[in-house]
Image (cartoon, rainbow, N blue to C red):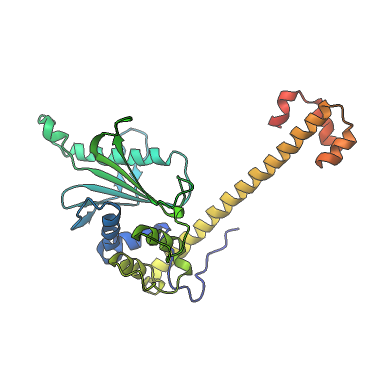
Amino acid sequence: MTQEYQIPPGQRYASLMTDSSFKRAFVQWQDGMLTKLLLRELIPERTLKEIRFLPTEHTNPIPGMKDIVVDVECTDEEGAKYIVEMQLHYQAFFSERMVYYSAAALLEELRKGGDGKDTASFYDYPPVYVVALLNFSMHENTDKVLFTYQLLEKDLHDRMTDRLNFVYLEMPNYKGDLKGASSVLQAFSYVMRNFPEMSERPEGLKEDLFRVLFDSAEISKFRPDERIKYVHDMTTERDIRNQILTARNQGVEQGIQQGKEEDASNLLKLGIDIEVVSRATGLSVERISALRAMPPDKVNNQ
């Protein structure tokens, strides 16, 4: 049975890694100032004087396919597009999904390009940046948190185009504390992952990014409906974590059982008595008898 999450008494800051609190902080709070400040850190080559938020749902041009919904999407004064996604858990084909999102954004730009008669201007669309804030690591054994991808020639690393860009912030890669953070992005990664345990903004975090970040996460500033959404999201997130943990534990148990049965089969091949095999592996005599009766290629599939 699902047990509703309760905000602990005295907790000052909410986690911003839930759907409602993330969008509240990055879109609604101070007209999305947090998104602009973070994008400046992640993509320093863009000046980003102003940004304008766009609808987050894209109509899928493929019949029968569901529409594409992103967390945050905005554009700057020069027309560049930014898709910002928060991803809490590892997901197969995640990068492929990010490429798919970029294609949807590019397709909308091409639709704005007129009738296509002026080929040069038709393809002179603004760049697209897909930004992923990851609560899992895709690169082990490094404290590097920022990874930027573009289309490059395999050997010479010549850039084919600057119109497609993928920016990953792998927050778990930084495993130190705030005192050991050597960059704004390492400090940001630490704060995002530890917000609920923090009681105040550390004095060393003086940048505007952190001022807005901490203000946006302060639970006392949530409206009643925002608190309800936050509690709902946290309840859902806890359920997901429990499901992942349960599946992982079941996988471990299945692996242990499979290992025992493989050991038993090998001992049986050596002519060891069933009673001895049972004591050695912890399997029942009945199960070992069943294994002995199975063809060898069927043991691992049971």
Query: Looking at this view, is 230 or 32 the one in front?
Result: 32
Q: On the picture, is 265 further left or further right than 54?
A: right
Taking the view exactly as shown, the residue that stands out farthest to the bottom is: 10
Query: Looking at this view, is 269 or 21 the one in front?
Result: 269
Q: Is residue 272 above or below residue 129?
A: above
Residue located at (51% from left, 60% from top): 235
Q: Total of numbered circles in the picture?
A: 0
Q: On the picture, is 74 further left or further right than 187?
A: left
Q: Is residue 260 above or below residue 168?
A: above
Taking the view exactly as shown, the residue that stands out farthest to the left is: 118
Q: Is residue 269 visible?
A: yes
Quarter of the image that includes the C terminus: top right
Q: On the picture, is 49 further left or further right than 276?
A: left
Q: On the picture, is 3 further left or further right than 18?
A: right
Q: Is residue 115 visible?
A: no
Location of residue 67 by image quarter: top left
Query: Looking at this view, is 65 or 162 the one in front?
Result: 162
Q: Position of residue 68 (x, y in %)?
A: 34, 43
Quarter of the image that includes the N terminus: bottom right
Q: Position of residue 252 (x, y in %)?
A: 66, 44
Q: Position of residue 224 (x, y in %)?
A: 40, 71
Residue located at (82% from left, 42% from top): 282
Q: Position of residue 4 (x, y in %)?
A: 54, 64
